[in-house]
Image: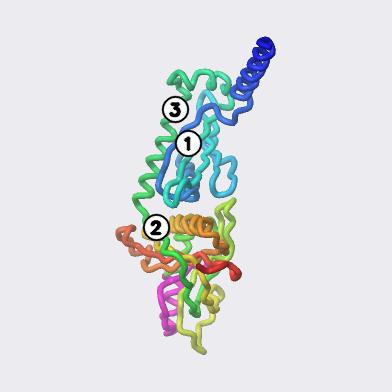
Amino acid sequence: MLKKIGVGFFIIVAAALIWYLFIKPSDYIINFKVVTTPGTVTQSLKSWNYDVPDSEIIAQDGLNKVVQQRHFSDSVVNYTYEAKMINDSVTQVSVGVKDLDHSVINRLTAPFKNTLFRKRSTENVETFFEILREHLDQINIEVTGLDQTRSTYVAYVPLKGLQVEKARGMMQYYGYIGDVLLKNNVELNGPPIIEVTDWDTETDSIAYNFCFPIIRSENLPISKDIKYKRLFQKEAIHAVYNGNYITSDRAWYALLEYAERNNLEVEPKPVEIFYNNPNMGGNELDWKADIYLPLKQDSPLE
């Protein structure tokens, strides 16, 4: 009997050791918490990655998981960032670190010694955490709940690009559309609007219309670039965003999380209304945008 128990215990220990040394996804895990959404964490990571030498994003799984691969002189290391909301405001981030060249030795030493691998891993994650925290200090998002988008006739220019290029597109066409409308005595009917028509969350690319609300008339100017249509009122979840318009998409992720918590089905086609001209500069925390995420028509209202 004792022999059987001993054999069973040996098998369990051996299996656990094999899993730890050769199967476990990460050599070392670092955790931290932050007051934001998982989407903001992963978007901030990808933005930071552009400034990190010898680094690339090699994989993404939805909005919550991103793998960053970094090349050092002595090794290639994968950092797998997984973000999960643990309540309505706090996200826990787990960073699994794996050295592709020295995995086994790191698993044997990292839990017990402050090795170069462990020290470098901790410093790199801490650097990202500080950059993320600085970013969050520069924006403010308040989800207010259910609301409606406005109905208005608009002059618009259809554009495509990455999410981070949206503000650049606005700045490029802000003066052009405004000048054409002004020269032709077209009456404006509110601040500019972004209507997202397609959002690819895997590539962070969007198609969108940059719109100027106008009073419809019979003598609208003809232009190869400017088109006209009506935006119709829609039921939506609403948020107020303050900060640089380059990162107004952070509110999109807050609205997606709100929808999930409240069992609301949404169309991933945000609508944004901007009250400040980015070309004029100023304190970015004073910039304001109303952000809407439309509900699917059959989504229940509460």
Chain-order first, disc 1 or disc 3: 1
**Does the magenta run of residues contain 300?**
no
Residue at (41% x, 76% y) in the render: 190
The answer to whether 177 appears left or right of 225 in the picture is left
**Closer to the camera: disc 1 or disc 3?**
3
Residue 288, percent across and down?
Answer: 37, 64
N-terminal-most mark, 2 or 1: 1
Callouts 1 and 3 close, C-beta under 8 Å: no
Give the camera-side residue of 205 and 179.
Answer: 205
Residue count near mark 2 (Cα–Cα under 10 Å), binned few <14, some 14–19, many ≥20: many
**Disc 2 target residue:** 141
Magenta stretch: give its range: 175-195
**Neighbour class for label 3 at 10 Å: few (<14), some, many (≥20)?**
few
Q: Is residue 5 left or right of residue 196?
A: right
Tell me the CA gap for discs 2 and 1. 31 Å
The residue labelled by disc 1 is: 53
**Residue 157 seen in render:** yes
- Could you give the CA–CA distance between mark 1 and mark 3, rounded to whole angstroms? 15 Å
Identify the amino acid type marked 3. Answer: Arg
State the quadrant of the N terminus: top right
* Residue 54 placement (x, y as % from top left): 51, 35
User: 20 above or below 158?
Assistant: above
Where is mark 3, residue-wise?
Answer: 120
